[in-house]
Amino acid sequence: GGGRYAYHPRPHPDPYDATHHVHYSLVSLYSAERCWSHAMEIKTLYDDARDALRLGGGAKKKNKKRGTSDGDDQHGGAGAGGGNRKATASSPAKIRRHYVRRLRKAVAYATELESRTKVSCDDRTAVEARAYAGWMRGTLALEVGDWQSACTEYGSALTTCRALGQGESSAATTAGTNGDNGAEASASDTAAAAAVAAEDLEMRDFFAARAEHVLEPLLRYCQYELQEGGMDQSALASLMKAQEDAENALLAASSFPAAARQQQQSSPLRSKLDSLRDDKRFDEASAGSSMATVHFRSRDVAVESQVLRFDLLKIVDLRSELAKERQDGAKDSAAYETKFLSLLSLYDDAISLASSDLKEYQAMKAGPAVNAKKFEFQSLLGYIKYEKLKLLMGRNEDMVDNLRAAEEEAGNDVTPKTLEQIAHLYDALLQDARSVAQLPGGSPDGSGAEEDEDEFVLEANANVLRLRALRCYYVARLYALDIVAKHAEAAALFDQCKLLASRAAEEIAACQDMDDSLIESMDSLEDKIRAAKSRSVACAYLARIGGGGGSQGTSSVTNILKRLDDFEAGQNSTDKFVDVPPALEPIPSKPTFFDI
């Protein structure tokens, strides 16, 4: 009944009833993707409406002062109440509610897909669907501000994607099956296995990139929001560890590739070792036997926070591992890079903890005891920032040393790109050095009276001058290139560079703990400056008198006999003394004598 075009409801199949065809899972997948794409389209509209509302706020205020409205401008003042009519466009809040509804619908379909693939698909497809559903649920939690649920879901998806990115090649299983038949395996089977292996490698790269570039940044953002919301670091670590253990248990329970199962079998041992290290660090942090105080700017600063001591102990252990790998020559490996980024992350966490402790005392009323505590936490914050900046500067210095070694090997054939890279690295080093010079923790009363006597400040200022001189030198060399040919500007920069180098050498000599090799480097830099400046001055003179300077200063191709009075570099000119055979010389066809 109801006619041809009436709505006829059809019963939704149960997951266990959908095992006879894969199309049921595809329906859930396509529905989830359709809702997701619609939600992204609505989000774009929401962003545009919010930007239009923010940009149009100033115009509305001006119109309100004049007694007019946007409606009067658009409708030509039609009616006395034209300015009070309700806007036809949807508000950003209404658009956002629509966007969140579509996102919830996508999450529902993704969860349905996860439940269906458990029954109607193989184990790998079920694992992929679980990662997909976890990412979708995490995105919804991120949009509504449920940071803890977002952390749990993103962590689950991240663990699964990493397992898929490191899993065993499915081609190995195919090869093993064909190997049982012995010589019966044909060439077509071998080609099929190779194609499956190539496809599996591509999928592993896809999941590894998804985990590194998409899920991990989202997870770190949610963890940051939880810390800003007041969650303790130990509680956050416990939450993420519980989630990871649960996801590993699910992966181990499924008939996932053998490599993944072996990884899960060996992970309890690694987890046990990590937990033992964490327990040891926690015991040391609780007893105060390690990292109870730190030395910064000629004073000992107490570390009262147990969580902060725990983080500092982890930093010390990781730095020792990195130093050992540097000695073994593995500083260019991917594992070293990963540990270096983890170390920077630990420093960021420690800075966040120290800043939160400092905020509590900054909100209190000033007094001798409060000021002393405030200065103590400022010194502790300055110590952590200094250690992080020192780590970054050391890495950049290594990169500069490698580039300068390549420059010395190239000699006169050094490329402008190399000089640009060195100048950019010295620019980054200069910014970090200035940040070091501005770190807190100088004077207990905050007046800066001891700043002149502070050895830390003297060293920081000397390092700033040294980096300024080096940066100025390479910028001047860029100006002195033949393709730029700004030799007068380069000579002026070399003068400034020589002044900075001499001042830096004096400041370094005045510091007690700085290396004497830095003074020698400034002396050798002055020698290079004198040579480079002499060349720039000569090129500028040749360019001023018209002969040109540098390798592109002349276009003359005449012999030396005819250009004795020309000032030029001569790289592109001919080295002939005379023309052989002699060049033709024009003579008058009718001499003046015969015209008389």
Image: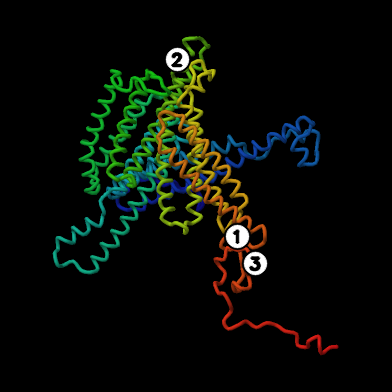
What residue sits 61% from the left and 46% below the top?
492
The image quarter in which residue 195 lies: bottom left
Residue furthest toward the right? 596
Q: Earlier in the sequence, mark 1 or mark 2?
A: 2
Residue position marked by numbered label 1 in the rendering? 549
Identify residue type, mark 3: Asp
Residue corresponding to mark 2: 373
Q: What amino acid type is highlighted by mark number 1?
A: Gly
Q: Contact (CB < 8 A) between labels 1 and 2?
A: no
Which one is in front in this view, the residue at disc 2 or the one at disc 3? 3
Horizontal and vertical percent for residue 123? Answer: 27, 48
- Looking at the rendered structure, the secondary structure element under dot 3 is loop
Disc 2 residue type (three-letter): Lys
Query: Of the residues tagged 1 and 2, which is closer to the observer?
Result: 1
Q: Is residue 550 positioned above or below 512 on the image?
A: below
Of residue 482 and residue 329, the one placed in the foreground of this image is 482
Label 1: how many Cα within 10 Å (few below 14, some 14–19, many 20+): many
Q: How far apart are marks 1 and 2 (CA)?
A: 64 Å
| Crowdedness near tag 3: few (<14), some (14–19) or many (≥20) residues, C-alpha within 10 Å | few
Question: Foreground: 267 or 417?
Answer: 417
Residue at the (49%, 22%) spot, across then down: 453
- Residue matched to label 3: 565
